[in-house]
Amino acid sequence: MDTAFKSADLPNDKDYTWEVKANDRSYQQKINNTGFFCFQKKKYADNSIKTSKYNLLNFIPLNLYEQYHQAHVIYFTLVILLQCIPQISTQPAHIIVIPLICILVVRGLRDISDDIVVVIRVLI
């Protein structure tokens, strides 16, 4: 589907051509670069909107990073570290780990459910 445009009215008597290859699949595949592990790296960005915060790979690290920006999570972690020292511990450390794990798991489930609800609302 090559369309050529030639104009004789342009200065300097040169032939100018303009080729439009909008629907030429072989031409489009040539200009795409091969990326990592033979994945096609596109020349242009796609026109998609991402409304989700997490994906399968970054959920745990990103969620823990966000949760450890809060004072109560840091406090519980420091108390657990102090309870690991036998000379100053009043209770076994595994007893104090349970509330921290509960806080992290419940907040993680809440964050992932909020993220899923946002994606579903965009799709509807």
Image: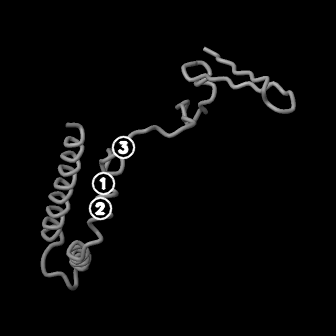
Residue at label 2? Answer: 64
User: What residue lies at 54% left-to-right and 35% top-to-bottom?
Assistant: 42
User: What residue lies at 87% left-to-right and 32% top-to-bottom?
Assistant: 12
Crowding near the residue tagged with mark 2, few <14, some 14–19, many ≥20 C-alpha atoms within 10 Å: some
> Cα distance, mark 3 to mark 2?
25 Å
Nearer the observer, 10 or 39 = 10
Q: Which of labels 3 and 1 is toward the front?
A: 3
User: What residue lies at 55% left-to-right and 35% top-to-bottom?
Assistant: 41
Nearer the observer, 61 or 97 = 61
Residue 122, quarter of the rendered image: top left
Residue 60, quarter of the rendered image: bottom left
Residue 17 place in picture, x, y as percent:
74, 24
Crowding near the residue tagged with mark 3, few <14, some 14–19, many ≥20 C-alpha atoms within 10 Å: few
Q: Considering the image in quadrants, where does the C terminus appear?
A: top left
Q: How many marks?
A: 3
Q: Considering the image in quadrants, where does the N terminus appear?
A: top right
Note whether 55 is above or below 38 in the view shown.
below
Q: Are marks 1 and 2 in contact (CB under 8 Å)?
A: yes
Sequence-first tag of 3 and 1: 3
Q: What's the amino acid at mark 2? A: Leu
Q: What's the amino acid at mark 3? A: Ile
The residue lying furthest to the bottom in this view is: 88
Crowding near the residue tagged with mark 1, few <14, some 14–19, many ≥20 C-alpha atoms within 10 Å: few
The residue lying furthest to the front in this view is: 9
Q: Which of labels 3 and 2 is toward the front?
A: 3
Residue 35 place in picture, x, y as percent:
57, 36
The residue lying furthest to the right in this view is: 12
Nearer the observer, 7 or 93 = 7
Residue at label 1? Answer: 60
Residue at label 3? Answer: 49
> Cα distance, mark 3 to mark 1?
23 Å
Q: What's the amino acid at mark 1? A: Ile
